[in-house]
Amino acid sequence: MKEKIQPGNKRKVVIVGAGAVGSTHCYALAQSGLADEISIIDRNEDLVRGQVMDLVHGQPFFPTVSIKVGSPADYADASVIVITAGAAQKPGETRLQLLQKNAAIIKSIMGDIMGQNSPGVVIIVSNPVDILTYVALKYSGWERERIIGSGTVLDSARFRHLLSTHCGVDVHNVHAYILGEHGDSEFAAWSMTHIAGMPMEKYCPVCQGCSDWQAERVQIERSVRDSAYHIIGYKGATCFAVGLALVRIVEAILRGQNSVLTVSTLLNGEYGLSDVCLSVPCIVSDMGVRKIIENELTERESASLSASASILKNTVKELDSL
Ligand SMILES: NC(=O)c1ccc[n+]([C@@H]2O[C@H](COP(=O)([O-])OP(=O)(O)OC[C@H]3O[C@@H](n4cnc5c(N)ncnc54)[C@H](O)[C@@H]3O)[C@@H](O)[C@H]2O)c1
């Protein structure tokens, strides 16, 4: 396996945003042993100081890793920068006002990253992730490979979990992808869903786990889409699964793994779509997105992907500036 980082070089990850997602990701990343150094940056200085103190007290139980409060200077030698910074919606604030605010935050962070000539790959996590990935790309002028959105990596994990539970099969043996927007217009790519190498059309009759698999599919797809709403309703934020999904993306980059992940990437003619960031299967490696995999979709899936793209493009048009 090709390794980007040579012996003696640090595997350094900078996490921007020390809130629920950033701190949970840091905790999971520290346990993974993938990074030598993790710096966390947040504009809330007390929060980031407290999070780092709490995390470093776990060092006797982690693989060796340095965790510290970071500053923009840390971008200069970072291999990966994970941006989870975002403003929370205030009462009375519209979706568009929040979007403008988060776009400004992403541009300001990208400005700092560019100011340090960072060699790192940037992973955008803050929502709306597809729009903010697009904003970061347009603002920086960087090549599309190096700025990726966490996209539907989390949603695909939710989909695999639900299929695994439904079919009674180890989740590691379920291959399944959610494509499109990370949000309401996302959809399950059933034509790409496999168990034991069998497409679901072949697996369902063998499985015989339910009486009406078509109805079950609709229900599973809806459950994936509504997961975040339910979790946020119960506990105010989602953090554990997304923190782990981010570890998986960081791993693919740090280890140059060529992993197939549904990250959000800028399409440039692939799937007949251009100038929009959304999730399709990509090969993720040391430089970010190494290749976009163009699979044959069914007519319904193609229409869903185009619908997602239209929704995202219309949202970008609402922004004051890029
Ligand atoms: N893409 C996904 O799959 C996914 C999943 C869950 C959450 N999210 C998104 O991740 C983001 C973070 O969620 P959270 O629950 O951790 O929110 P949070 O409010 O707990 O944390 C956000 C943090 O960002 C910090 N911040 C704001 N502006 C900053 C700036 N300019 N520089 C540095 N730090 C700044 C805030 O101080 C805060 O600590 C949200 O946008 C959320 O919607 C994405």
Image (spheres, rainbow, N blue to C red):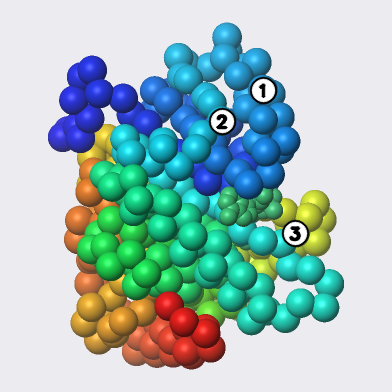
Residue 127 at least partly seen:
yes
Residue 296 at least partly seen:
no
Q: Nearer the viewer, residue 80 or 296?
A: 80
Residue 53: numbered disc: 1
Q: In the image, what residue type sits under mark 3? A: Ile
Residue 26: give x, y in percent of width and height.
55, 34
Considering the numbered disc 2 on the image, is that residue within a helix, a strand or a loop? strand
Cα gap from disc 1 to disc 2, whole angstroms: 9 Å
Q: Does 217 sit left or right of 232 as displayed?
A: left
Considering the numbered disc 1 on the image, is that residue within a helix, a strand or a loop? helix
Q: In the image, what residue type sits under mark 2? A: Val
User: In the figure, 22 relative to 139: above or below?
Assistant: above
Which residue has dot 3 on it? 232
Residue 280: numbered disc: none
Cα gap from disc 3 to disc 2, whole angstroms: 28 Å
Pointer 3 or 2: first along the chain: 2
Which residue has dot 2 on it? 69
Crowd class of label 3 (few under 14; some 14 to 19; many from 20; radius 10 Å): few
Considering the numbered disc 3 on the image, is that residue within a helix, a strand or a loop? helix
For ligand 1, the image quadrant comes to: bottom right
Q: In the image, what residue type sits under mark 1? A: Met
